[in-house]
Image: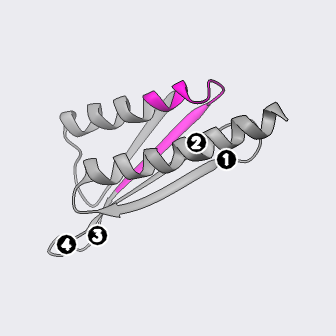
């Protein structure tokens, strides 16, 4: 699976990039046919709380899966977005078995 990370309104650090790659990479445990993952990290209004937005799009056979979460830290937002995608991948897998 290819993981593309884009940062908007800030410069991503190596440790955050490694964290995102690790978390998104684990999604392949739930569904092995993920083609690409696109992660967009956005810093909105730097002086406010919950100003870090993460948008993850997974290219899979059929319609793409998508999750967008906003939190106080990028790590927290990535965790929440990945959890949402895990349940979407589980539903997709169940649907294909039927």
- Mark nearer the N terminus (2 vs 4): 4
Indicate the colouring scheme.
one colour
Which residue position holds label 1? 64
Position above or below: 49 against 25: below
Q: Residues within 10 Å of mark 3 (few under 14, many from 20)?
A: some
Which residue position holds label 2? 58
Q: Residue 78 at what x, y percent from top left?
A: 35, 48
Write the residue at 62% across / 40% down. 89
- Mark nearer the N terminus (3 vs 2): 3
Q: Report the mark closest to the observer, 1 or 3.
A: 1
Q: Residues within 10 Å of mark 1 (few under 14, many from 20)?
A: few
Outermost residue toward the left in this view: 47
Q: Residues within 10 Å of mark 2 (few under 14, many from 20)?
A: many
- Mark nearer the N terminus (1 vs 2): 2
Q: SS at mark 2?
A: strand
Indicate yes or no whether the magenta region holds residue 32: yes
As rendered, which of 9 and 80 lies closer to the eye? 80
Tell me: 39 left or right of 7: right
Which residue position holds label 4? 49
Compute the Cα span from label 1 to label 2: 6 Å
User: Disc number at residue 44?
Assistant: 3
Q: Is residue 7 visible?
A: no
Compute the Cα span from label 2 to label 4: 28 Å
Q: SS at mark 3?
A: loop
Residues rendered magenta in the picture: 26-41
């Amino acid at each position: 699976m290819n993981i593309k990370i884009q940062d908007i309104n800030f410069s991503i650090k190596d440790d955050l990039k490694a964290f995102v790659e690790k978390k998104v990479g684990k999604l392949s445990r739930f569904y092995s046919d993920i083609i690409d993952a696109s992660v967009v990290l956005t810093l909105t209004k730097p002086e406010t709380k919950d100003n870090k937005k993460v948008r993850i799009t997974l290219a899979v056979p059929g319609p793409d899966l998508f999750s967008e979460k906003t939190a106080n830290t990028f790590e927290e937002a990535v965790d929440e977005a990945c959890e949402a995608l895990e349940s979407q991948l589980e539903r997709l897998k169940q649907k294909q078995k039927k």
